[in-house]
Amino acid sequence: MAWLRQTLAVMWINLQTLPGRLGSSVVAIIGIAGVVIVFVSVLSISVGFSSALKGTGFPDRALIMQRGSDTEMTSGIGGMEARIIQDAPGIRHEGDLALAAAELSLVVDLPKKAKADATANVPIRGIQPVSPKVRKEVSIIEGRMLRFGTNEAIVGKNAKAEFAGMNVGDTIVSGVNKWIVVGVFKANGSVAESEIWCDAQNLQSVYRRTNAFSSMLVQMDSADSFTRLKEWLEKNPQVQVGVQRENEYYASQSRTMTQIIDTLGYGIASLMAIGAVFGAILTMYTSVASRTREIATLRALGFNTLSVIVSVLSESLVLGGIGGMAGAIGAYLAFNGFQTSTMNFQTFSQVAFAFRVTPALFATGLIYALSIGLIGGLLPAIRAARLPISKALREL
């Protein structure tokens, strides 16, 4: 208890004298805050991207693709196979209607809204009349639903925000192909909000994919029906397909991109952290030098070495904590909710999403800042504890 009282007393004295070293302290805080801003903002891209994909899909829906295909873009299912799949056990029915939608996924090259001279591969999905019944999370927020059998289209709200010509009444032009935008939809923040939807038969005709689809999305009776559905389809010699839960498929689609962004974020932040650590070291060495007599006096009065070390580290941690909070708050205010789009390297199509500074990312940035403060204060703290008392007192 005596050691704890000594430590708390020294820490309190140390923190009370902090305003006297305001200049060097502010430099350390700014350096640490800069590291945290970059760290949190870069990782918020990863979090936003992965959230858009991982938030897509439901465990009681199954995505059926050609066996061996990793993405819808590389998958092909014939019309005859689609009809056989509709009869598989475990698929929910509304009367005689099987809730199984055969869809065609392609990309069209369209201009970005922010840069008129830049284009992007925007995903376009051909849907069937049953698709809205399967995708119940989708709702029209502007205009109306498309009429099947026509060249009308609806667009996701993120696609409207990112790409040109996506307002209701606009005409989407890709080569000689044209679709009239009649509505805008939302889908609980999922990747579907980056897509253009049109009639599947119209899209087949435009791209000469007669009676061919990319995948089938089916609503199961329940999440527990998955095994029965999967076994029946994979053992059926009439179809050559693989079956995944929809949410698991989209979660796997985010891995490559999030790994790239996370590696980049940690790499940049680590390089910047080296500079911030040196800044913290210089700040704390200055603090120790300015308090040489004070530290020597405390030790001459019987305060132990560990209390001195803890007191110096506490100042360094306080500076790190302030810098971390400032950086995390700055990143949140500047980037949270910022809308952008990027290439999904597994499908080679654009995904529009928003940066997300989550509480977990906020906490990670703060821990990163405290680590910088701890490392930066360690050597100065050891030096303070090793100061010869007699020599330090002669500096009076």
Image: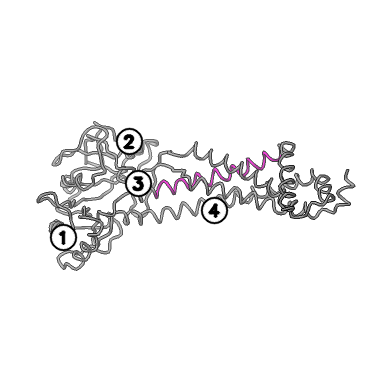
Q: Which residues are magenta?
A: 24-50
Label 2 sits on residue: 164
Q: Secondary structure at mark 1?
A: loop
Label 1 sits on residue: 88
Q: Secondary structure at mark 2?
A: loop
Label 3 sits on residue: 350
The answer to whether the residues at label 1 and label 3 have Cβ atoms under 8 Å apart is no
Residue 228 to residue 333: above or below: below
Viewer-nearest of discs 1 and 3 = 1
Q: Earlier in the sequence, mark 1 or mark 2?
A: 1
Label 4 sits on residue: 267
Numbered badge on residue 124: none
> Which image quarter: residue 66?
bottom left
Q: Indicate yes or no whether the magenta region holds residue 35.
A: yes
Mark 1 neighbour class, 10 Å CA radius: few under 14, some 14 to 19, many 20 or more: some
Q: Earlier in the sequence, mark 4 or mark 2?
A: 2
Mark 4 neighbour class, 10 Å CA radius: few under 14, some 14 to 19, many 20 or more: few
Looking at the picture, which amino acid does disc 3 mark?
Gln
The residue sitting at 74% across, 36% down in the picture is 20
Q: Indicate yes or no whether the magenta region holds residue 33.
A: yes
- Measured Cα–Cα span from mark 4 to mark 3: 25 Å
- Measured Cα–Cα span from mark 1 to mark 3: 33 Å
Looking at the picture, which amino acid does disc 4 mark?
Gly
- Measured Cα–Cα span from mark 1 to mark 2: 41 Å
Q: Earlier in the sequence, mark 3 or mark 2?
A: 2
Locate the C terminus by quadrant. Answer: top right
Left or right: 149 in relation to 47: left
Q: Earlier in the sequence, mark 4 or mark 3?
A: 4
Looking at the picture, which amino acid does disc 1 mark?
Ala
Q: Earlier in the sequence, mark 1 or mark 3?
A: 1
